[in-house]
Image (cartoon, rainbow, N blue to C red):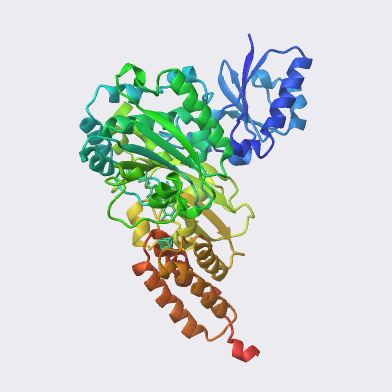
Amino acid sequence: MSTRVFIPGDSAALSVGADEVAAALRGVAEERGLAVEIVRNGSRGLFWLEPLIEVATPAGRIAYGPVASGDVAGLFEAGFLSGGPHALCQGPTEEIPYLKNQERLTFARCGITDPLSLADYEAHGGFCGLKRAIGMTGAEIVEEVVQSGLRGRGGAGFPTGIKWKTVLGEPAGNKYVVCNADEGDSGTYADRMLMEGDPFLLIEGMTIAGLAVGAAEGYIYIRSEYPHAFRQMSRAVEIARAAGWLGPDVAGSGRRFDIHLRLGAGAYICGEETSLLESLEGKRGVIRYKPPLPAIEGLFGKPTIINNVISLATVPVILERGAAFYRDYGMGRSRGTLPFQLAGNVKRAGLVEKAFGLSLRQLIEDFGGGTASGRPLRAVQVGGPLGAYFPATLLDLPLDYEAFAAEKGMLGHGGVVVFDERVDLARQARFAMEFCAIESCGKCTPCRIGSTRGVEVIDRIAAGKDPAANIALLQDLCVLMTDASLCALGGLTPLPVMSALTHFREDFDRPQAAAAE
Ligand SMILES: Cc1cc2nc3c(=O)[nH]c(=O)nc-3n(C[C@H](O)[C@H](O)[C@H](O)COP(=O)(O)O)c2cc1C
Ligand code: SF4
């Protein structure tokens, strides 16, 4: 009987040599006449240990990492195929504290199964949610999602069930389900990991959404920087279609639902839902005025559900285990779990799925192990490039939509980027304005012109030119951009800028240029 060895085929693992490790392992096993079955699983999300290889033993899966191809012969010598001791051995995978202390609902299967094996997917609870949904009316499915308290994981946190209710309420006819897989936020990768590590889950979630609102077609819009996720999703769609989980008669239900994939072209603004719809229709990615909402006039002018990958991939567990099960996790109005993504200057970067309510400190210190440099943490940016910079004094803030909003920040898509004492927050503020200037779709003046003026004003402050007047001007500009921008790109750029100014004012206080000139 052959021994199963799991070597992630996820982009993060590939980028640090997982393919080379797989080739070396296959070579040594052949040389020694050992029967080894290599499974290219998704990543467990413990990036500092990648490539993290696992061996299936009678006592469960044993992990080794980070493994380089040069380590492979030594692993065989150490008897790793039966879980033998080695300097890289991490013990039973499920016992690694980083993993053991998580609450994985959406990512329950990621890294465990062969991502493209339908049999593996079903053996681990796959399609249970869809099977239940097939026996329900659209209104019942929508009500289950409403009751779960699920809010959009793409950034805005809008209640998913309410959005679906609007689409359900529109007259029958062509309706669409669009999955937003543009994942443009800095420090985020949960969408990519899920599409590469458990693609059938997204297919299942989209199909449930289609059944709920009476849509027969879905589109996944994937950013061009994710070619591997695109290939993996394309193959998963073909496999699901061939097995009858997609197509004219979904799982024998007599209902039609199919999925198409589209590749973006590298614009941050195409992650905003209305620009994304323009782009899907083959036009330039420019914001549409709202109203009408996409739920009423979306793709090709038809009622459209547009949701983030994680929102849609969370629906199957809600249908499978019930709204109350999911709602029991979390705090306040933030129900369920969020896959937080640790990045930047942190010792143990990776994906941490936890119920809302743990603190930033628990996330960064207990899971992340503090800064990678070992220097004191100075700032943390949560929520992507439009998120606020918080100082170490705010580390006890609970990870909750409302708690973050009260501190003029946001959770966004759950990206957490850590900086040590060497960061210059005036430079980060300038970067926020510059990013907005580069990525602006150009439709409204506060964003198109305001962001460029913002860069200039911060440059003057950094040069020590009349700082008091220029800081006042910057604050005024931020109020204007917040109040008058057409969409959240221009509207939220003031968050990182103002948080830098509020919490790290000393970085803006430069000696008067006049004195130096
Ligand atoms: C500039 C900008 C970029 C955005 N980028 C993304 C993105 O990459 N992925 C995403 O899911 N939502 C993104 N959003 C949010 C979407 O507009 C929209 O709220 C989301 O797709 C709705 O899905 P949800 O309710 O499941 O979160 C972005 C919004 C803005 C303003
Ligand atoms: S704020 Fe205005 S210019 Fe900026 S991206 Fe949105 S619509 Fe376009």
The part of the image, by quadrant, that contains residue 136 is top left
Position of 483 relative to 311 (above/below)? below
Q: Quadrant of residue 209?
A: top left
- The foreground one among 304 and 189 is 304
Residue at (59, 19) in percent of width and height: 56
Across and down, in percent, residue 476 comes to 40, 77
Quadrant field for ligand 2: bottom left
- Left or right: 100, with 150 as reference point: right
Report x, y in % for residue 408. Answer: 38, 63
Name the residue located 45 percent from the left edge and 30 percent from the top edge. Answer: 108
The quadrant of the image that shows the N terminus is top right
Looking at the picture, does residue 387 appear above or below residue 188? below
Is residue 265 visible to us here?
yes
256 and 123: which is toward the camera? 256
**Residue displayed at 48% across by 30% down:** 199
Q: Position of residue 91 (x, y in %)?
A: 60, 28
- What residue do we see at 28% from left, 23% from top? 134
Residue 104 placement (x, y as % from top left): 43, 34
